[in-house]
Image (tube, grey):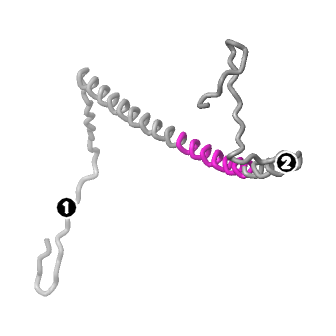
């Protein structure tokens, strides 16, 4: 502590310590091993966490697989739609060509009143039977 001597502040000198040999000891604390039951508890809790995470992961894998199948199905539907459009156009052009081709070959279009009824063929008798409805 500082003290005053008149108008001068003087600080006490600290006592000098002797620099001698000081024996130091270190304390080593050994942790006691965990009991067998506690080890099993830790092991089972870790195993439980791993199983739950695996179960959740498999759920995500199933969702991923379903999404992939949905995308593949959508692609196939689009391809089928485009091919159906092409086939419809082709069908319409073929229907238009039928009338033209028939006229070229000399066929005549039949009116509704001039319909021809052909009797059905019977396999049992080997002859043509009466047409149904006449």
Residue 72 position, x and y percent, is: 58, 42
Residue 77 drawn above or below residue 35? below
Check disc 1 and report the residue beneath it.
15
Q: Would you say 92 lies left or right of 72 here?
A: right
Residue 115 drawn above or below residue 85? above
Residue drawn at x 23%, y 22% is 37
Residue 48 position, x and y percent, is: 32, 29
Nearest the viewer among 97 and 66 is: 97
Q: Would you say 89 lies left or right of 54 here?
A: right
Check disc 2 and report the residue beneath it.
101
Secondary structure at numbered mark 1: loop
Q: Name, please, the residue furthest toward the right.
A: 105
Magenta span: chief secondary structure? helix
Residue 31 drawn above or below residue 114? above
* Residue 80 falls inside the magenta stretch: yes
Magenta part of the protein: which range? 69-91
Mark carried by residue 36: none
Mark 1 crowdedness (10 Å alpha carbons): few <14, some 14-19, many ≥20: few
């Amino acid at each position: 502590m500082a003290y005053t001597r008149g108008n001068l502040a003087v600080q006490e000198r600290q006592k000098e310590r002797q620099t001698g040999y000081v024996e130091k000891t270190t304390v080593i604390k050994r942790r006691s091993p965990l009991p067998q039951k506690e080890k099993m508890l830790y092991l089972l809790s870790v195993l439980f966490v791993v199983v739950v995470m695996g179960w959740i992961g498999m759920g995500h894998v199933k969702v991923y697989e379903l999404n992939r199948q949905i995308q593949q199905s959508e692609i196939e539907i689009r391809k089928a739609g485009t091919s159906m459009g092409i086939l419809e156009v082709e069908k319409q052009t073929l229907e238009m060509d039928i009338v033209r081709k028939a006229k070229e070959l000399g066929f005549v279009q039949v009116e509704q009143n001039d319909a021809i009824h052909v009797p059905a063929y019977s396999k049992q008798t080997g002859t043509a039977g009466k047409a149904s409805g006449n």
